Each structure stands twice: as C-alpha cells, then as structure tokens.
Image (tube, rainbow, N blue to C red):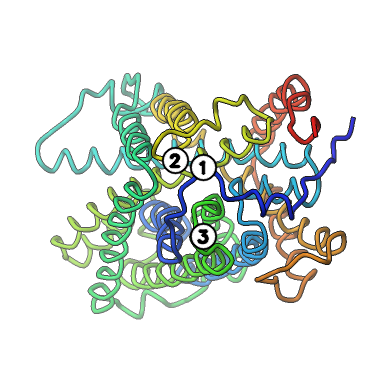
Amino acid sequence: MNLFRRKNIDAMVTSAPGPLRKVMGATDLVMMGLAAMVGTGIFVVLGRAALSAGPGITLSFLAAGVACALAALCYAEFTAMIPVAGSTYTYAYAAIGEIVAWVTGWSLIAEYGLAASSMAVGWSGYFQTFLSTIGVHLPVALTAAPGAQEGHMTFFNLPAFAIVMLATALLSLGVRESKRISNLMVLIKVAVIVLFIAVGIWHVEPTNWTPYMPMGMGGVVSGAAIVIFSFLGFDVVSSAAEEVKNPQRDLPIGLLGSLVICILLYVGVSAVATGIVPFMDFRGSDSPLALVLQRADIQWLAELVLLAAIFGMASMVMVMGYGIARLVFAISRDGLLPKFLSTVNHRQVPIWSTWLLGTCSALMAGLLPLQVLTELICMGTLLAFIIIAAAIPILRRTQRHLKRPFRVPFSPFVPLLSIIISVVLICSLTQLTWIAFGIWLLIGFVIYFGYSRRHSKLRRA
C-alpha cells in the first residue's frame, strides 16, 4: 500500500489540455484575486483590528500582506510549472504524495466551502441594511441562522442561502459569462474604495494618529493575526490554471498582482479610517466604514460604500464557489472522489460539482452562525500554506530537471519563513477549532481508506 505515490509532472502538463475552456488572461486572474480578498477585511474586520493595533493597523495590514506574499511566491512557482486545476492539492500530489494531496484537498474543500458560506452570511447583513433603507423588512425568522440573534427566534438565513444559490447559477453558465459579472462587481467595489480614500483623506485629523502604536509592537502583531484572514483566498487564483490562456506568464501575475493591489487598498483605507475616527471608537461597531463616514458627515458616500459591500461580498461568494468546484473536479478526475463530480456540460463547466457543492454551501450559510464558520476557514488555508511551502524545496531536490518559468527567490529561506508564520498562526486558533478540524480530517481519512485509495487512477496505473 503506497500512500506516497506521486503523479508524474511531465505527464500532468502534457495531458493538461482537457475539457475546461481556456478563456482567462492575466487581468481576469488579478480580478479573481481581488474578488476573493477585497471585502471582509475592509467592511468587517478593520474596526476589530484597530482596537488591538490603534493607528498602527496600517503596519498590521502591511505585515499580514507580506506574510501572505511569501506563500504567494510558492504558489507562483507551482502554478507556472504545473498549470493544472486543483491548486495545492495537485502540487502536493506531484511533490509529496497521494495521502498528503488528499489531506490538502480535503482541507481546501472545507476552506472554500465554508468561506463561501461565511461571506454569504456577511453579505446578508449588508443586504438587509440596504433593504431597511428602502422600507423593506424580512420576517425575523428568516434573517439569521438558529440562535444567531440573541432575544430573537430565528430559523434560517434566507438572504445568505439565496446569494449562494444565485452565484451557483451564474457559475453554471460558464467561465466566460460568470467572469464578466464577477469582474464588473470587482470594479464597482474597488472604485468605491478608492473614492473613499480620495474623499476621506481631506477629513483626517492627524492628532488621531498619535500615539501611532498605543499598544506597542505587540499590538501591531496582534492586529496582524486578525487581519491576515482578510487576505486568505488569493490561492483560489491557482484553481483556474487549466482555464488560463498563458498560464506560465499570467498565473504569477494574477497571484502577486492581486495581492499587491489588495495590500495598498487595505493600508490606504485603514490609514484614512483611523485618521477620521479615534481607534477606540470602533468598539462595538460591525460596520467600521459606515461609522467613519457618519463622523465625517459624508452621507452620499455612505450609500455607495453600502453598495460596494453588497457587490464586494457577492463577488467573493462567486469566486469561492468557482474554486471549490474546480478543486473537486480535479480530485474526482484522479479517481479519489466519484466520477460524476468531474463531468462537464456543453459549456465546459463541471456541472455536478458546481451545483452539489453550491447547494451545500448555501445550506450552511442559512443554518450556521458566522462565528462557527470563520476559524475553520483559516485552519484549512494555513495548512495549505504549510504544505505548498514545504513542497518547494522537496520538488527542487527530487526533480531538478523540471523547467521553472518562475522561481521563488531565496529558497529555501522564503518557504521556511512562510511555514514558520503559518504554524504560529495555526497555534493561535482556539481548541474548539482544532477539535472541529480534527473531526473533519477523520471523516476525510474514512473516505480515503474506504473509497479513494482503491479507486485512485494512479494506483490502477
């Protein structure tokens, strides 16, 4: 029983042109990365992190972005070398072995699925705020998951369920069609965020930036541990590898380009926000930008920010739905999941994966509170970061003949630093998260040894 059998990279690349349509370029990949990242960090997390770091939250965003950039460099080397669907799962299969690939893929299924659900729950809150501004109110029982609102009897989060199902329907139309809608939503939210920075900077009171680090460097580090989760999701870009026209060039551009733009937006917004509102005033605020614009008396922009939040989180739901469908498509194609999950329709869409996983994410969004979803997302992502970083030096040592259009600089030091940062962040997660993730992995091992190992195409070969 060889649990560490590896896929041949040359064969993977040669057979990569498959049923998926190659329609994406570098711009589309940058937009996909922005769709996955720009949203929660600005519209939700910013205020909570400011309480830990003060105005030094700009350094927290910068530090968190650099930490993710280390992982992005590792992804860039693999995506350019192995332009095949499946993201970290595929790279682990080639570099380390089948059992590690399965653990990675199973973890990413949790990440992408829960991420789509949690973003839908966040979207639901903003959408209900928008409805209230036009005098529309949903029945309380359909506004949140059971037990999510203290003092109210709630049964189901209908808006969260609806947005995931709508995103799934759009994804089923095909990559060319769905990417146009997603790109439009990304342009709207980025334009509004840039407008917030350009207008808000004239209302900044520099005294609010003093002291810059009221809790010292420890506060900045604590803030970074909070906001790093705002960047998680850029790895979904690598899931599009088989649908990219020129993957060797465009995938590294998409990964690193979207991350750099996101860092600049987060740093700019956090600097303006803490310059207008003293950081301690963010306590208890779930909508930090709304508070900032209220203090600055810029009501017309507040409505645009609400619109940007709605579009921004909707695009995040779409991108995560896209990522999980392509991941499961790749795992199924290798025989580790049932064959029907890699079936594509006439639009070259893995239709069963898209609808089945979209429906599961929609049900979780309707039935689970936001706090139950968030930390499990981080666990799956950080584990993927550790595996992708470890795979770089392993593959360089075992398969030196491979052509690498992009190389991680200063290897193995950059991958090692990425592993250390990810381990530190994983250790900061709660015990309950570890238990829940352990149960998820146990279920994964039952599936692997009960089905996947025997049906593996590599084992048959």
Name the residue at the left extreme.
135
Q: Which residue is mark 2?
A: 348
Q: Secondary structure at mark 1?
A: loop
Upstream in sequence: badge 2 or badge 1: 1
Q: Amino acid at mark 2?
A: Gln
Q: Are marks 2 and 1 in contact (CB under 8 Å)?
A: yes
Q: Earlier in the sequence, mark 2 or mark 3?
A: 3
Q: Nearer the viewer, residue 165 or 456?
A: 456
Q: Position of residue 75 (x, y in %)?
A: 64, 60
Picture quarter with the C terminus: top right
Q: Earlier in the sequence, mark 1 or mark 3?
A: 1
Q: Position of residue 313 (x, y in %)?
A: 35, 48
Question: Which amino acid type is shown beneath numbered disc 3?
Answer: Ser
What residue did someone put label 3 on? 52
Badge 3: few (under 14), some or many (20 or more) residues near its Cα, within 10 Å? many
Q: Is residue 91 visible?
A: yes
Distance CA(mark 2)–CA(mark 1):
6 Å
